[in-house]
Image (cartoon, rainbow, N blue to C red):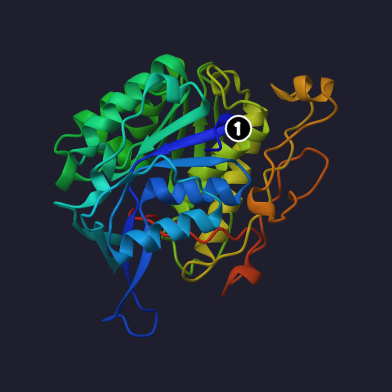
């Protein structure tokens, strides 16, 4: 198992998305997905070691999902195994985004392994989110792991609000209260705290000592810092071919950037200043735009995050040891970082991407969430 201070333990579901065919919408293709699994794959392809702790079914879909993660470089050694089938999410695209109908009951997907304090302490960060945070029996395991991570490590939460599975959102609000880093869309925040402006909810969470990143789809993203500073970055212009997975790619990019900056540790993200927060958001926006600009799953390996600007937290320690060290690529696959010189990458130019060769960063994710750009 590839744990360590620069790695991320990802807890949640890996399932199968049934996605309409581009040419024959009545047909559905089976694609591996699940928001946490997407994040794990994105991290591995961005050069950040990722260990996935989820439930894997004993059917063909379960083998497909695990092969997909392992081929990307994700460590699946902690996964719980079950002869039960794999959960399904049936995509239903519409003019306002992609909705999903779920087949979740009596599946292996939501039977997660136990995560102990000793296990949590071996990772730079623990990610929790997706449907597993609200669907039993996984929800209880996620809540227990989140409490351990909150007390012994760095907890990152990406709430996935679905009224059909979470009622009034109480469990997700509890996770956000435990987290050190929260990434949420404006829609998620509006549903979790109805009657309050999403930005006000994000600011209140940040004022309690958290880094909060709010995504707003095509309107870009904003980082809310514990210092009360706010940094906004516009979305990268792109001709959207497929927005599925963009938000998960954004989350993976944020974590990969924090890892490259030496901030994947308890207390690290809370010390982020406005300039570095802007660089982080710009990088994540570029990664999300690349996913929006490609059709289907893609498969190219993206570049690793660029080194943080000089003076970034964690960089001085790295320089003292002989230079900045970002996570090594997994499995011997190459992929150097975009642009040298320590600056965040500039946004990709507008284009219509037809595949990984047209994308500045090609991750190839699928997701169980609906996004407009990087929501």
Residue at the image point whose x is 63% and y is 23% from the top: 273
Percent from the top left, x then y, of residue 102?
20, 57
Residue at the image point whose x is 51% and y is 48% from the top: 74
Percent from the top left, x then y, of residue 115?
35, 28
Q: Is residue 136 above or below residue 177?
A: below
In the rendered picture of this protein, how many numbered marks are placed on residues?
A: 1
Please name whichever residue, 134 or 239, is drawn nearer the observer in this view of the structure. 134
Residue 271 is drawn in which quadrant? top right
Residue 118 is drawn in which quadrant? top left
Q: Is residue 213 above or below residue 251?
A: above
Q: Residue furthest bottom?
A: 24
Q: From the image, tell me which residue sits under label 1.
A: 258
Residue at the image point whose x is 72% and y is 33% from the top: 308
Percent from the top left, x then y, of residue 61?
32, 64
Under circle 1, the secondary element is helix
Mark yes or no: residue 154 visible. Answer: yes
Please name whichever residue, 268 or 301, is drawn nearer the observer in this view of the structure. 301
Mark yes or no: residue 96 visible. Answer: no
Left or right: residue 179 versus residue 284 is left
Left or right: residue 315 versus residue 86 is right
Q: Is residue 93 above or below residue 278?
A: below
């Amino acid at each position: 198992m590839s744990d360590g201070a620069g790695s991320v333990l990802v807890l949640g579901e890996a399932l199968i998305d049934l996605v309409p065919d581009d040419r024959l919408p009545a047909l559905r293709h089976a694609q591996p997905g699940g928001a946490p699994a997407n994040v794990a794959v994105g991290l591995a392809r961005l050069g950040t070691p990722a260990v996935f702790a989820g439930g894997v079914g004993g059917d063909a879909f379960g083998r497909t999902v695990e092969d997909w993660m392992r081929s990307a470089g994700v460590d699946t050694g902690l996964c719980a195994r079950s002869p039960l089938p794999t959960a399904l999410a049936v995509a239903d695209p519409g003019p306002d985004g992609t909705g999903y109908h779920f087949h979740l009951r009596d599946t292996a997907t939501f039977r997660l392994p136990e995560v102990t304090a000793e296990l949590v302490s071996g990772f730079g960060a623990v990610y929790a989110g997706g449907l597993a945070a609200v669907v039993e029996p996984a929800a209880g395991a996620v809540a227990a792991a989140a409490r351990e991570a909150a007390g012994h490590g760095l907890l990152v939460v990406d709430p996935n609000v679905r009224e059909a599975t979470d009622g009034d959102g109480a469990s997700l609000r509890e996770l956000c209260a435990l987290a050190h880093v929260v990434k949420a869309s404006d829609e998620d925040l509006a549903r979790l705290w109805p009657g309050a402006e999403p930005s006000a909810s994000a600011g209140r969470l940040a004022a309690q000592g958290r880094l909060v990143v709010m995504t707003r789809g095509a309107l870009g993203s904003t980082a809310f810092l514990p210092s009360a500073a706010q940094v906004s970055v516009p979305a990268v212009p792109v001709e959207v071919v497929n927005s599925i997975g963009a938000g998960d790619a954004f989350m993976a990019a944020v974590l990969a950037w924090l890892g490259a900056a030496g901030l994947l540790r308890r207390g690290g993200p809370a010390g982020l200043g406005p300039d570095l927060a802007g660089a982080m958001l710009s990088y994540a926006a570029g990664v999300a735009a690349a996913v929006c600009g490609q059709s289907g799953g893609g498969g190219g390996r993206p570049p690793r995050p660029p080194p943080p600007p000089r003076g970034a937290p964690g960089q001085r320690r790295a320089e003292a040891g002989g230079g900045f060290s970002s996570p090594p690529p997994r499995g011997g696959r190459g992929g150097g970082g975009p642009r040298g010189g320590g600056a965040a990458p500039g946004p990709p130019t507008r284009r219509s991407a037809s595949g990984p060769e047209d994308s500045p960063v090609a991750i190839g994710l699928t997701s169980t969430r609906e996004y407009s750009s990087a929501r």
